[in-house]
Image (tube, rainbow, N blue to C red):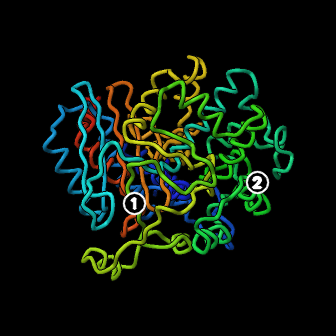
C-alpha cells in the first residue's frame, strides 16, 4: 500500500493502502515512495495513496499488522471477529461494510449498516461495488498472459508499443507493472481533479488520461524509485488492446472473468455510470481537489462528522472512466475472494509465469525490507497476496494467504474516512490482527564468554 495499495484513492492513493497492508498484512509511511518528490507544481496525494489516512500513521500501524500476519494462524473466534469488524466500521463512520473470511475452518461473513446513509436496506455479500485499483490485477494478469504466450516480454521497452512515451526506450513493461517507471500519475493532476469535481459524469478516454501525464515531469529515472501511477496501467491497457486488436473490456472478459466464472464481476463500458443491482450508495466527505493535499478532514470537521452534523457527499453516480484499466471494475465480495484465490492457486498463469508473479512483490522502499511490498500489479500484505482499491465512495481490500488457506475481503461504501484512513484497509488490518498470532521472538544466543 503506499498504499500497496489501491489510492487510486486507490486509483489515486493505492500506495498508502498497500503500505499499511504490507506492514500488516499496504494500499502509507513505509509506503512513502522512494525517489524524488513530485514537482512542486503537482500535488502528492498519490504518494500517500490508497489506504490510510496519512502516510506516516498508516505505515506504523501497518508495520505492526505485518508482523502479526507473519505469525501462526489462530483458531477462528467469530465473536471476536464480529466485534472487531463492527467496532472498526462504527469508528470509521461508514454507512455500510461487508467482510468475507475463508479459512480451513470454513467461511464467515458479516455485514454492517445499510446501502445508503439513513436507509433501511442492509448491505450484503450480494451487493456490487466499484473495486478501484483491484482492477489493476486484471490488467496485470492480461499482460502476464501475453508474456507467457510470447506476445511481448517483461524486458521490452514501452517505446516498442508507444513511441510517444518520453524516455520510452529506457522504460520496460516490468517497470510499468511494478510502478517503478517514474511516469507522472495523471490522477495527481489538478486538471483531472478539478474536472472530476465540476463534471463528474464526464466520459474520459484512455488517450486523454495519458495525454495529461506524458507532458509532465517524471518522478525519477526508470527503475530508480517507486511511485504509484495510474498512467502505467492505462498504458498497459492500451498495449493489450494493440496486441489483441479488441477493446480491453472484451480482453478481460475473455481471459479473466469468463474462464474463472466471475459472473458478478465486470469491466463496464466507459460511458456507464451505473452499478448492477443490488448495490450501495458510495460516499466521501471531501471533494477531489481537496484530497490532493490531504484526505484527512481538519479536527473540527472530524468532530462534526462524528457528531453527525457534517454529512458525506454521494459519489455513486460519478463516472469512473478516469481510472479505466487502473480502476474501472465492479465486483462482489464473493467474486473478489474467488479472484484472490485464483491468483495464488495457479488458475490464471502457467507455473513458470505464476512463480514470476508471486515472487515479484518487493519493498517499495529498498531500505525497509519490512515495509510495503509491491510487484507486478500485485501487492503482498504479510502472508496475503492481493490488492486494495479505492474510488470516491468505495474502498475494498482482498487478500489470500496460500500457505494457511486464508482469504479475506472487506469493502465499505465510504472512502476515504473523515480521518483520512481507507476504511476497508483499516478494517482488514484489524481483522488480520485477530487471525494471526504474533511471530515468535527468538531466544538470545548463548553467551560465548
Q: Secondary structure at mark 2?
A: helix
Label 2: few (<14), some (14–19) or many (≥20) C-alpha neighbours in 10 Å: few
Asked if residue 428 is positioned above or below residue 13 in the image, the reply reads above
The residue that appears at 22% across and 42% down in the rendered structure is 434
Q: Cα distance, mark 1 to mark 2?
A: 29 Å
| Residue 413 in sight here | yes
Which quadrant of the rendered structure holds the C terminus? top left
- Residue identifier under label 2: 207
> What is the residue that sits farthest to the left in this orientation?
79
Question: Of 237 and 299, which appears nearest the observer?
Answer: 237
Answer with the quarter of the image where residue 292 lies: bottom right
Pick whichever of labels 1 and 2 is earlier in the sequence: 2
The residue that appears at 44% across and 61% down in the rendered structure is 393
Answer with the quarter of the image where residue 80 lies: top left
In percent of width and height, residue 288 lies at: 54, 70
In percent of width and height, residue 65 lies at: 32, 46
Question: Of 328 and 79, which appears nearest the observer?
Answer: 328
In this rendering, position of residue 210 left or right of residue 419: right
Q: Are marks 1 and 2 in contact (CB under 8 Å)?
A: no
The residue that appears at 53% across and 48% down in the rendered structure is 133
Label 1: few (<14), some (14–19) or many (≥20) C-alpha neighbours in 10 Å: many
Q: Secondary structure at mark 1?
A: loop
The residue that appears at 57% across and 39% down in the rendered structure is 377
In percent of width and height, residue 68 lies at: 29, 41
Asked if residue 157 is positioned above or below residue 42 in the image, the reply reads above
In this rendering, position of residue 114 left or right of residue 241: left
> What is the residue that sits farthest to the right in this orientation?
163
What is the number of the mark on residue 281?
Answer: 1
Amino acid at each position: 500500500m503506499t498504499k500497496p495499495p489501491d489510492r487510486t484513492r486507490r486509483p489515486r492513493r493505492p500506495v498508502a493502502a498497500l503500505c499499511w497492508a504490507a506492514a500488516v498484512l499496504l494500499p502509507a509511511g513505509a509506503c512513502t515512495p522512494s525517489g524524488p518528490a513530485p514537482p512542486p507544481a503537482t500535488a502528492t496525494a498519490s504518494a500517500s495513496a490508497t489506504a490510510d489516512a496519512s502516510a506516516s500513521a498508516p505505515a506504523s500501524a501497518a508495520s505492526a499488522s505485518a508482523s502479526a500476519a507473519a505469525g501462526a494462524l489462530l483458531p477462528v473466534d467469530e465473536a471476536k471477529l464480529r466485534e472487531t469488524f463492527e467496532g472498526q466500521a462504527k469508528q470509521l463512520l461508514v454507512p455500510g461494510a461487508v467482510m468475507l473470511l475463508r479459512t480451513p475452518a470454513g467461511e464467515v461473513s458479516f455485514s454492517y449498516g445499510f446501502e445508503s446513509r439513513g436507509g433501511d436496506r442492509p448491505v450484503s455479500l450480494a451487493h456490487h461495488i466499484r473495486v478501484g485499483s483491484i482492477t489493476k490485477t486484471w490488467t496485470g494478469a492480461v499482460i502476464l498472459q501475453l508474456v507467457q504466450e510470447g506476445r511481448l516480454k517483461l524486458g521490452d521497452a514501452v517505446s516498442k508499443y508507444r513511441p510517444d512515451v518520453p524516455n520510452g526506450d529506457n522504460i520496460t513493461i516490468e517497470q510499468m507493472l511494478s510502478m517503478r517507471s517514474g511516469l507522472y500519475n495523471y490522477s495527481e493532476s489538478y486538471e483531472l481533479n478539478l474536472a472530476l469535481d465540476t463534471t463528474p459524469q464526464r466520459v474520459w478516454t484512455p488517450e486523454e488520461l495519458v495525454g495529461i501525464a506524458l507532458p509532465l515531469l517524471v518522478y525519477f529515472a526508470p527503475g530508480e524509485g517507486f511511485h504509484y501511477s495510474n498512467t502505467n496501467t492505462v498504458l498497459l491497457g492500451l498495449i493489450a488492446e494493440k496486441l489483441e486488436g479488441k477493446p480491453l473490456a472484451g480482453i478481460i472478459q475473455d481471459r479473466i472473468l469468463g474462464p474463472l466464472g466471475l459472473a458478478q464481476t465486470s469491466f463496464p463500458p466507459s460511458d456507464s455510470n451505473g452499478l448492477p443491482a443490488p448495490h450501495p450508495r458510495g460516499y466521501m466527505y471531501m471533494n477531489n481537489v481537496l484530497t490532493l493535499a490531504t484526505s484527512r478532514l481538519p479536527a473540527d470537521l472530524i468532530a462534526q462528522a462524528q457528531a453527525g452534523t457534517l454529512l458525506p457527499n454521494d459519489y455513486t453516480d460519478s463516472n469512473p472512466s478516469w481510472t479505466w484499466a487502473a480502476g474501472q471494475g465492479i465486483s462482489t465480495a464473493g467474486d473478489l475472494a474467488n479472484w484472490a484465490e485464483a491468483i495464488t492457486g495457479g488458475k490464471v498463469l502457467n507455473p513458470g509465469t505464476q512463480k514470476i508473479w508471486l515472487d515479484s512483490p518487493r519493498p517499495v522502499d529498498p531500505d525497509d525490507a519490512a515495509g510495503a511490498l509491491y510487484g507486478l500489479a500485485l501487492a503482498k500484505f504479510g502472508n496475503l497476496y492481493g490488492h486494495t482499491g479505492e474510488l470516491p465512495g468505495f474502498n475494498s481490500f482482498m487478500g489470500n494467504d496460500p500457505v494457511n488457506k486464508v482469504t479475506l475481503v472487506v469493502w465499505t461504501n465510504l472512502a476515504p474516512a473523515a480521518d483520512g484512513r481507507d476504511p476497508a484497509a483499516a478494517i482488514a488490518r484489524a481483522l488480520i490482527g485477530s487471525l494471526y498470532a504474533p511471530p515468535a521472538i527468538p531466544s538470545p544466543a548463548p553467551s560465548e564468554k
